[in-house]
Image (cartoon, grey):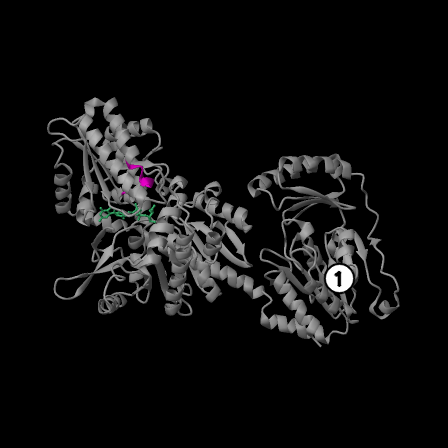
Amino acid sequence: MTHDNAKAPRNAASPSPGADAKGRVVIVSNRLPLRMEDDGKGGLRAVRNVGGLATGLGPLHEREGNLWIGCAEGLESASRREQKRLENALTARSCRSVLLDPNDYERYYEGLSNSAVWPLFHGFPQFAMFDEDDWAAYVRVNERFRDAVLAEVRPGDAVWVQDYHLMLLPSLLREALPDAAIGFFLHIPFPDYETFRMAPWREEILRGMLGADLIGFHAYDYVRHFLSSCRRIAGVENASGTIAADGRLAHADAFPLGIDYERFRHAAHDLRIRREGKERAGEKGRAGCKTMLSVERLDYSKGIPERLLAFDAFLDRHPEWKGRVTLTLVTVPSRENVPSYRALKKRIDELVGQVNGKHATLGWTPVDYYYRALPFDRLIGLYAASDVMLVTPLRDGMNLVCKEYLACHDDGTGVLVLSEMAGAAYELHEAVLVNPFDRGATADAMLLALTMPEGEQRRRNAPMQRRLARYTSQMWASEFLGAMRDVKRRQAGLSARLLGPKPASRLVEAFKKAPRRALLLDYDGTLAPLTGDPAQASPDEELLELLRRLGEREENDVVVVSGRRRSTLEAWLGRLPVSLVAEHGAWMRALPPAAARHLAAARPSWTLLKPFETSWKDEVRAVLAEFVDRTPGSFLEEKDFSIAWHYRTCSQELAERRVIEAKNALDDLPSAQGLSLLEGSKVLEMRPQGVDKGAATKRWLRDPAFGFLLAAGDDLTDEDMFGAAPKKAWTVHVGNGPTRARFALRDSAEVRGLLRRLAEAR
Ligand code: GDG
C-alpha cells in the first residue's frame, strides 16, 4: 500500500452533506483512509493512504460530523492496550475501526475479494478461484461491517458503502434500516452478463447491491452490464436505470470519479519538485532523452508485460529512437500473498531484463524499473517531467493516474497514451487511445506520442484539462449524494400514495360502514405473484380461503377480473362465491344479486360481453408463431378472443428487439383493423377493440348501491378499470410506476394483507 502525508493542500469546493441535509455521511470501506504511525515522540500521527478512494472521499470525510468506518492497518496484531490507543487516535479523526478475525479477513480479502471477484470483474475468469470457505468468510465480514455501521448510524444519516469488498452490506443494512439512505459505489468494472454469471454466488451479490437506494459505477457500460444481470439473473426489471427491487425503488447510474485537480496542479507547480523530478527521471538516461512513464500497482489487469513487449516492438521498428527515449516503469508492490501476483512479478522482472539486454547501449538503459511505492513528491516530479504517460491497462474501472498526469501538465504539454479499456477513456477522448492487446498499434501510439508537435499536444490537452478541473473528486461525491437524495425524494413521492397505515385504516372504516361493497380484483400480480410460467400461478389455500370468506358475506360482491381464459378461472376459482371476468372482460360469470344468491341452485353460467369477431386469429397466430420460433423461451397462449405472446422467461435483450419487430409485423396485417394490441407485463396480446376491464366492471362501478368500491390491479389492463371508477372509489395500483389509481401497494403480499383485514372487519 502507498502513502503520502495527510496534510496536503485540499480543494475548497464543498460536497453536499447527508441524505436529509442535516444528517451526516457515513462512509464505509474495507480500509480506513488513514493509518496511525509512531511520531517518534511517543505519540501517533495520521498518515493518509493513497488510492482513488481515499483521495476521492477525503474532503467529504473531513467535513464536520462525517464519519468513516473500515479496517485499520496493524490493529489486529496489536496488544489490547495498543489497540485502545490506536482506536482513540482514529476516533479523534472521525474514523471507526472494524476489528475482524484475522483468518476471516484473509479469506475475505485475499480470498474472495482479490482471488475471485477482482479477476472475474476485470475479465480474467481464468484467475478466479471460487472457494466456499472464502465466500462464507466474505458473508461473515460483511455482517461484521453491518454491526459496526449499526452501532454508529443515527436517523437522518446517509450511509455510503464503497467497493467490491462490501457488496452484501447494502442489503444487510437495509434489513435493519428499511428507510435509511444507503448508497453503494463500485470502483472496479461490472462485467458483462456472460462473465458475471460464472460467479457461484451471483444472485446473492446482486441482491446485496440492490439493498442500496443508489448504485453507482464509473461508466455507463458497467451500469448496463449490472442492469442486464439484474434482469437475467435476479429477474429484477428496470426502466432507464430505475429499479423496482422487492417493491422498493432504487436507481443505478454512472458517476465517473475525478481527482483533486488543484492539489496535483499546485504540487507540480512547485519548481523544486519539478527540478528534482527531471533529475531523477533522467538519472539513468542522458541529456536530450525523452521519457515515457508508467505507474501502477503490480496487477495483471494493468497490462504491464504487454506494454513492455510493445516497447520492445517499438525499438525494433524504430531503432533511431535507441538512446533517445527511456521508459520509466514504476510498479507498486501489491497482493504479494496471492499466487497470480507473484507469478506476474517474476514475468515482469524477466521481460525488463530481456528488453534491456536486447536494446541497451553503453550509457543508455531503455527501461528504468522501480518495484516500490514512491513518496508523493517524487511521483509528482515524475509526472511533471515525463513527456509521455503510458496508461495501457487491459481493464481498469476508471484509472486516476492518467488524470493526475494531466493535472501536472497544465501548461498543455505532455502526451497521454490511454487504453480504451480504462473507464477514463470514456471521458478523455482527446488522448491517444489504444487497444492494449494490439502490440503493433501500441508501438505506433508510442511513436505518435514521441513525435507529436507541441501545438497538437496543447490542442488535445485543453479540453481534458477543463473537464478535470471541473469534474473533481469533490464534485463526484457531491453529485452522488445529490442523486441519492433524488432517489429518496422519488421514494417519498411514491410512499405518499402508498396505502400506508392511515389511509388503509380509513379504507377499512369505509368498508365497515358501507351496506354494500364491491371488490374488483385482478389476479396475476395482484392476488398472486407473477411467475415465469403462467400455469404455475394457481391459487394457494390461503388465497382460496380469503376469497371464500369475503365472498360469503352478503354485503360483498367479490369479482376477480383477469385476462385469463374462462376455463382457467373456472377451474381455479369456480367453486367460490365470487364473480369472474375472463379475457379482460370478453367473458363474465356474474353471481346473482346478494339477496337471491342462496336461491341459485347451480353455478352461474358464462356470458359474452358482446359477440366478437374471430376470423383474424389464423393470420395473427401464424405471425406470432414465427416469433416463438425465433425467440427461445417465449410461447403463445390462445384464448377465445385473443392471442397472447408471452416472453417473460427469454433473454430480455432479444425479446426487446423482437417486441418491436412483432409490433411492426402485427400492425401491417390487413386483419389488424378492429383489433387492439395490448402490451402487458412481458406479454403482447391481440384482441378485439372494445374488450376492456373498465367496460366489463361497469355494472359495479356505476351502481350507486355500492357504498364501497375497491379496484386493485398491477398492469396496463387494470388502468381501464381505474379510469372507469368513480372518484371516491379506492383504486389501488400494485407495484410502482405511472398509474391512474389513487393508491399503491408494493406487491401481492400487501394486497392479501389488506384483504385479510377486510375479511376480519366487522
Ligand atoms: C481502484 C480501481 C479506480 C500509485 N502509485 C503510487 C501512488 N499511486 C496512487 C496514484 C493514484 C492511485 O495510487 C491509483 O489510483 P487508480 O485509480 O489508478 O487505481 P486504484 O485506486 O488502485 O483502484 C481504479 C480507483 O479505484 C478509483 O475508483 O480508478 O480503476 O481499480 O491516486 O497517484 N502514489 C504514491 N506513490 C506511488 O508509487 N504516492
Percent coordinates x, y for residue 714 in the rendering:
64, 56
SS at mark 1 in the image: strand
Residue 466 higher or lower than 58, as above or below: above
User: Is residue 570 toward the left or the right of residue 124 in the image?
Assistant: right
Which residues are the magenta region? 298-304
Q: Quadrant of residue 5?
A: bottom left
* 435 drawn magenta: no
Name the quadrant of the C terminus.
Answer: bottom right
Q: Quadrant of residue 631?
A: top right
Percent coordinates x, y for residue 405 in the rendering:
25, 42
Q: Nearer the viewer, residue 528 or 73?
A: 73
Mark 1 lies on residue? 559
User: Is residue 302 toward the left or the right of residue 408 in the image?
Assistant: right
Q: Nearer the viewer, residue 137 or 747?
A: 137
User: Is residue 635 toward the left or the right of residue 595 in the image?
Assistant: left
Residue 248 higher or lower than 677, as above or below: below
Q: Residue visible at 11% across and 29% down?
A: 363
**Identity, as a three-letter code, of the amino acid under mark 1:** Val
Percent coordinates x, y for residue 314 in the rendering:
26, 26
